[in-house]
């Protein structure tokens, strides 16, 4: 009775806000729903829907160019996630466990990395890689995978740093101090105590870095070399000749990988004892 009375007393503003919220969600997710539906298109072009089928997914297995682009994107995302997780974890732990004025300066630098337009990063990275690879004689920087991995890890490193710092900033250093009092070596304390406390954020940061690196289109378009074209750049070049259903099919697969990664992030943080509010705060780096 009480519940029905509350539903009956809902004002028109509450109803209007609920309707508006649903419309906003539909507006945001409608393009994604459309691309998923069109990934099952049996037509030759993406915009021409002839019927449902799995032809587009089978085409992926028959096109070496598509396979190579997907492989480059996955390998690059994995390497950049490892780089970002390593550097971001060390930076996040340092900011949380060694506070001081330097932390705010460092956070400002990370914020600068986060808000700098990708086109600026791309324009800066290209001549830098050319200088390192050709002028300074470091051929490793002429490799496409290396260039893409470094370029994709810039923003992801800042994200991991935020996550790890947010994870540790609210936890006291009592366990680390107790470990030191028990004559544990600094490396042992770091590995068994500090890193263990930060591990949920480290895993979450790794998965987020992986997903963020999959769609780094602008930087990838500048720093790529022949033979290592990632998937976003392949799609960008395919627009000129007409998008085909296999583009939607691969996009659907990558969307599924992203959703799985985000679900694993939430599961890891939930297993660590975080509430929904804590998970949202950690994911936001706050």
Image: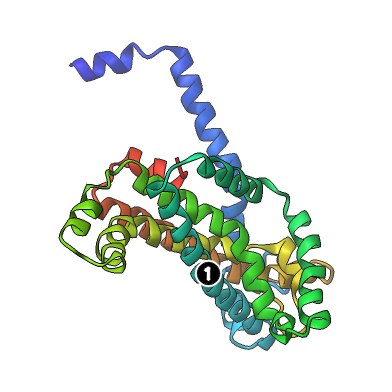
Residue that carries the numbered disc 1 in the rendered image: 83
Q: Position of residue 222 (x, y in %)?
A: 78, 68
Instruction: Name the one closer to the observer, 67 or 118.
Output: 118
Report the side of 91 relative to 239 (left or right).
left
In terms of image quadrants, where is residue 145? bottom right
Q: Position of residue 110 (x, y in %)?
A: 59, 49
The answer to whether residue 45 is visible is no
Residue located farthest toward the left when viewing the structure as drawn = 182
Identify the residue shown where x is 68% and y is 67%: 232
Report the side of 64 relative to 21 (left or right).
right
The answer to whether residue 185 is visible is yes
Identify the residue shown where x is 60% and y is 56%: 155
Assign the N terminus to one quadrant of the image. top left
In terms of image quadrants, where is residue 190? bottom left
Report the side of 265 relative to 4 (left or right).
right
Identify the residue shown where x is 55% and y is 54%: 158
Identify the residue shown where x is 35% and y is 48%: 168
Assign the C terminus to one quadrant of the image. top left
Report the side of 183 relative to 167 (left or right).
left
Could you say whether the residue bearing mark 1 is in a helix, strand or loop? helix
Question: Are there few (<14), some (14-19), or many (20+) residues within 10 Å of tag 1?
Answer: many
Q: Position of residue 216 (x, y in %)?
A: 66, 62
Q: Position of residue 44 (x, y in %)?
A: 72, 74
């Amino acid at each position: 009775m009480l519940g029905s009375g509350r539903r009956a007393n809902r004002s028109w503003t509450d109803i209007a806000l609920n309707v508006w919220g649903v419309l906003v969600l539909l507006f945001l997710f409608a393009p994604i729903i459309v691309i998923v539906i069109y990934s099952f298109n049996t037509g030759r072009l993406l915009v021409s829907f002839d019927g449902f089928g799995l032809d587009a997914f089978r085409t992926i297995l028959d096109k070496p160019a598509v396979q190579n682009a997907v492989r480059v994107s996955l390998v690059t995302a994995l390497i950049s996630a490892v780089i970002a997780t390593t550097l971001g974890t060390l930076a996040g732990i340092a900011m949380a466990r060694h506070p001081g004025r330097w932390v705010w300066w460092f956070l400002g630098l990370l914020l600068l990395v986060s808000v700098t337009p990708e086109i600026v990063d791309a324009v800066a990275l290209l001549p830098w890689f050319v200088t390192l690879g050709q002028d300074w004689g470091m051929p490793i920087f002429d490799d496409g995978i290396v260039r893409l991995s470094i370029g994709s890890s810039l923003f992801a490193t800042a994200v991991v740093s935020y996550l790890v710092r947010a994870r540790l900033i609210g936890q006291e250093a009592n366990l680390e101090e107790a470990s030191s009092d028990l004559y544990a070596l600094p490396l042992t304390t770091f590995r068994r105590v500090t890193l263990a406390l930060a591990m949920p954020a480290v895993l979450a940061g790794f998965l987020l870095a992986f997903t963020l690196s999959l769609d780094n289109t602008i930087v990838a378009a500048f720093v790529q070399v022949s033979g290592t074209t990632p998937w976003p750049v392949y799609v960008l070049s395919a627009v000129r000749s007409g998008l085909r259903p296999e583009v939607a099919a691969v996009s659907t697969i990558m969307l599924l990988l992203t959703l799985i990664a985000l679900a694993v992030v939430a599961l890891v943080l939930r297993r660590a004892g975080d509430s929904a509010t804590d998970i949202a705060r950690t994911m936001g780096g706050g």
